[in-house]
Image: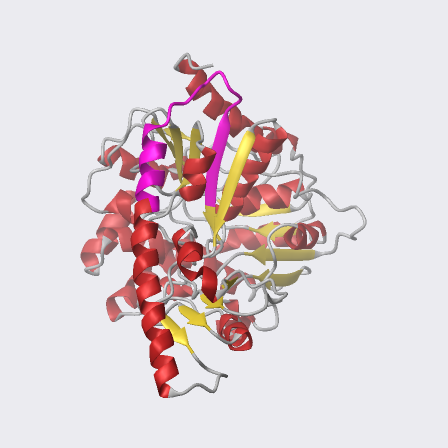
């Protein structure tokens, strides 16, 4: 495990910072502070801090404190090194005490601040660069709020931040926070509205801990799987499906649409444990998928019992793997007139997919352009059809091919916009038939970020605040 470092040699700091050393889970990034002239660089983890400002700079900063000093590139005697290191350690100790005091004051000020709801509403949102979907969802909401005339602070975390520090949040003093997948409510003023949108099977939904809500916490659930977990914990919620940002995702008419089917998304193979019991359960699920059988809660319970597997693991790991990885592998075996292109993380691990794998796309324009070039977008999910990729593809004029889980998803059907398949035979039939023109208007109009923002505003208005 790395340590955060203070460098006396700027070039050495640049060299180490460029390695972008991260924790095993990817969420923590090594911070490299440095002395000397400021370097021209875009590295977020390379922080210029002259040594004469060390204590004040660290005490007032928001990044993790360095724990060691680095002398590489400097010719210093042992006694001089000892003196510098002793001074450094004392400075870090002083900075830590001051930082803790300031963090406490920021927290207290925020907790006790008075909010005037006659002012234009201020919204705070956050994201982490290592999340592949959540950060973009949060940013899309922030952009829509900004477009609608609200004051917005979107804070993007890189993993170098001191998580005890809520300096930026406290100074902004929002009326409303919007949180994706996390409560983030322990430090909030009781007057602050907190809109929490659960989109993934987070630990807090599955463990035995109680979900502690404030009076102004409102929960939104993306899909039935999350509904069930919230219901099991007696947490009130409202359904909110994915939304589409048509400022980013729209048809690029300068790109020729080809006879092509594209898949954009990550492989789930890395989430498997590959135990013998798990392998047998996956074989069973694959056979069910081929025949078009439904993955019900009864199925999940039976597999959990038969193969001594955790039901949550079956539901959130094994079935998604079959619905995505297995179906994509089977698609690539089919004889079809459509060229197949695969984009995303993890697919390079499959030898049989190498002819189809095209790399990783950046969120936004790159994805939109690929969709604009294709006839179909393959977007299977075992529990819901109206996922992010479904909307993004539709907005770009590409027909989504989705796994038909309507018997358990309780979603509205958009047969005028989507192609549904339940079995591999259904998928073959879609790809051998003539293309049927689709109308995406209703699908896109019903699932906008503006409608979600209006839902948030209605919660606030219902409390006679505005």
223 lies above or below 347: above
Outermost residue to the top? 464
Q: Is residue 219 left or right of residue 453?
A: left
Colouring mode (rainbow / by chain / secondary structure / one colour): secondary structure
Q: Could you tell whether 120 is left or right of 217 in the image?
A: right
Residue 89, quarter of the rendered image: bottom left
Total numbered badges shown on the rendered structure = 0
**Percent position (x, y) of residue 339?**
67, 62
Front residue of 448 and 8: 8
* Quadrant of the rendered image containing residue 336: bottom right
Q: Nearer the viewer, residue 184 or 363?
A: 184
Q: Residue at x 31, y 69 (%)?
A: 274
Q: Is residue 451 visible?
A: yes
Drawn side of residue 157 relative to residue 275, left or right: right
Is residue 113 part of the magenta span, yes or no?
yes
Residue in the image at 47% along x and 35% along y: 172
Q: Residue at x 59, y 37 (%)?
A: 143
- Vertical arrangement, residue 423 with respect to residue 6, above or below: above
Give the camera-side residue of 338 and 221.
Answer: 221
**Residue placed furthest toward the right:** 254
Q: Is residue 387 visible?
A: no
**Where does the image place residue 196, in percent across and percent down from the top left?**
38, 35
Q: Which residues are magenta?
A: 102-126
Q: Is residue 77 left or right of residue 401?
A: left
Q: Position of residue 446 (x, y in %)?
A: 57, 28
> Measuring 78% from the left and 52% from the top, which residue is drawn there?
255
Q: Quadrant of the N terminus?
A: bottom left
Give percent across and percent down for residue 118.
Answer: 49, 16
Residue 346 is inside the magenta segment: no
């Amino acid at each position: 495990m790395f340590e955060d470092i203070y460098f006396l040699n700027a070039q050495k700091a640049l060299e180490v910072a460029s390695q972008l050393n991260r924790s095993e889970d990817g969420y923590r990034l090594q911070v490299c502070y440095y002395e000397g002239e400021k370097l021209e660089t875009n590295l977020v983890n390379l922080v210029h801090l002259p040594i004469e400002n060390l204590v004040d700079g660290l005490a007032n900063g928001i990044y993790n404190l360095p724990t060691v000093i680095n002398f590489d590139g400097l010719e210093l005697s042992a006694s001089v090194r000892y003196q510098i290191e002793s001074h450094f350690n004392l400075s870090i100790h002083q900075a830590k005490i001051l930082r803790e005091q300031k963090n406490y004051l920021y927290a207290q000020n925020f907790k006790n601040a008075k909010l005037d709801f006659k002012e234009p509403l201020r919204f705070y949102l956050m994201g982490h660069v290592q999340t592949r979907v959540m950060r973009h969802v949060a940013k899309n909401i922030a952009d829509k709020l900004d477009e609608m005339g609200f004051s917005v602070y979107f804070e993007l975390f890189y993993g170098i931040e001191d998580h005890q520090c809520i300096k930026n949040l406290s100074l902004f003093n929002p009326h409303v926070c919007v949180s994706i997948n996390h409560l983030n409510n322990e430090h909030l003023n009781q007057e602050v509205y907190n809109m929490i949108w659960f989109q993934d099977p987070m630990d807090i939904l599955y463990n035995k801990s109680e979900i502690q809500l404030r009076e102004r916490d409102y929960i939104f659930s993306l899909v039935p799987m999350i509904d069930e977990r919230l219901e099991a914990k007696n947490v009130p919620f409202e359904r909110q499906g994915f939304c589409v940002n048509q400022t980013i995702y729209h048809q690029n008419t300068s790109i020729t649409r080809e006879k092509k089917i594209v898949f954009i998304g990550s492989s789930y193979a890395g989430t498997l444990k590959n135990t013998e019991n798990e392998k047998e359960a996956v074989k069973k699920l694959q056979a069910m998928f081929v025949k078009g059988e439904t993955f019900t809660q009864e199925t999940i319970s039976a597999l959990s019992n038969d193969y001594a597997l955790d039901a949550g693991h079956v539901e959130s790991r094994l079935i998604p793997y079959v619905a995505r990885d297995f179906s994509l592998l089977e698609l690539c075996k089919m004889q079809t007139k459509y060229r197949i292109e695969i984009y995303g993380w993890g697919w390079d691990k499959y030898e049989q997919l190498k002819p189809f794998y095209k790399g990783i796309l950046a969120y936004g324009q790159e994805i939109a352009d690929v969709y604009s070039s294709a006839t179909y977008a393959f977007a299977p999910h075992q529990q819901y059809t109206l996922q992010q990729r479904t909307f993004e593809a539709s907005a770009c004029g590409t027909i989504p091919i989705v796994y038909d889980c309507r018997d358990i998803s309780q979603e509205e059907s958009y047969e005028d916009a989507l192609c549904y398949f339940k079995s591999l035979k259904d998928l073959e039939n879609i790809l051998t038939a003539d293309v049927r023109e689709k109308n995406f208007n209703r699908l896109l109009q019903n699932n906008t970020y503006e409608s979600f923002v209006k839902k948030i505003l209605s919660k606030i208005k219902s409390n006679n605040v505005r």
